[in-house]
Image (spheres, helix red, strand yellow):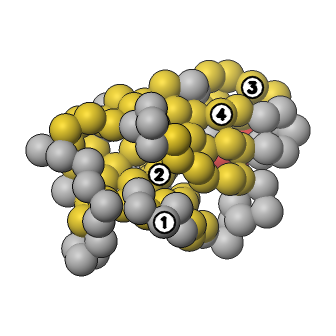
Amino acid sequence: QVQLVESGGGLVQAGDSLRLSCAASGRISSSTVIGWVRQAPGKEREFVAAITWSLGSTEYTDSVKRRCTISRDTAKNTVYLQMNSLKPEDTAVYYCAARSADESEYSYWGQGTQVAVSS
């Protein structure tokens, strides 16, 4: 089991920055992948970014690639999503999720943190 707790969301203006945090606990291993997935009102969940726990290899969806950075602090068991130049279309609930590297679907999910970007 892996437990995930997100924080850092809020209401910001377009162009602002936010840093989301995901505190992970439980069975975190070298094969764990931690990702951020967002869901806007009335839309399906959308992959945002992911990072491998061991090597820190990263992956991003094209719409955030130049504006977001995912990182992890293994000493604190925390994954961060730094989001810059926020746009109204970034408004969503952001979920932290975990899976094993040999799985394609995320098995563990946090409760989500709301990000709202006003124009």
Q: Amino acid at mark 2?
A: Trp
In this rendering, the answer to whether 23 lies above or below 50 is above
Q: What is the crowding at mark 1: few (fewer than 14 residues within 10 Å), some, or many (at least 20)?
A: few
- Residue drawn at x 65%, y 34% as measured from the top left: 19
- Dividing the picture into quadrants, the one containing residue 61 is bottom right
- Residue 6 is left or right of residue 119, and the answer is left
Amino acid type at image mark 1: Leu
Q: Earlier in the sequence, mark 1 or mark 4?
A: 4
- The answer to whether the residues at label 1 and label 4 have Cβ atoms under 8 Å apart is no
The quarter of the rendered structure image containing the N terminus is top left
Q: CA distance from mark 4 to mark 3?
A: 12 Å
Task: Please tell me whether mark 4 sits on a helix, a strand or a loop.
Answer: strand
Task: Report crowding for label 4: few under 14, some 14 to 19, many 20 or more residues within 10 A (C-alpha).
Answer: some
Q: Answer with mark 4 or mark 3, whichever residue precedes in sequence.
A: 3
Residue located farthest toward the left when viewing the structure as drawn: 1
The part of the image, by quadrant, that contains residue 99 is bottom left
Q: Secondary structure at mark 2?
A: strand
Q: Residue at x 71, y 65 (%)?
A: 65
Instruction: Give coordinates of residue 34: x percent, y percent.
Output: 39, 54
Quadrant in which residue 25 is drawn: top left
Mark 4 sits on what residue?
Answer: 19
Where in the figure is residue 33, as x and y percent of width and height? 36, 61
Would you say residue 36 is visible in this rendering? yes
- Measured in 3D between alpha carbons, the distance from the residue under mark 2 to the one under mark 4, in whole angstroms, is 12 Å
Of labels 1 and 2, the one closer to you: 1
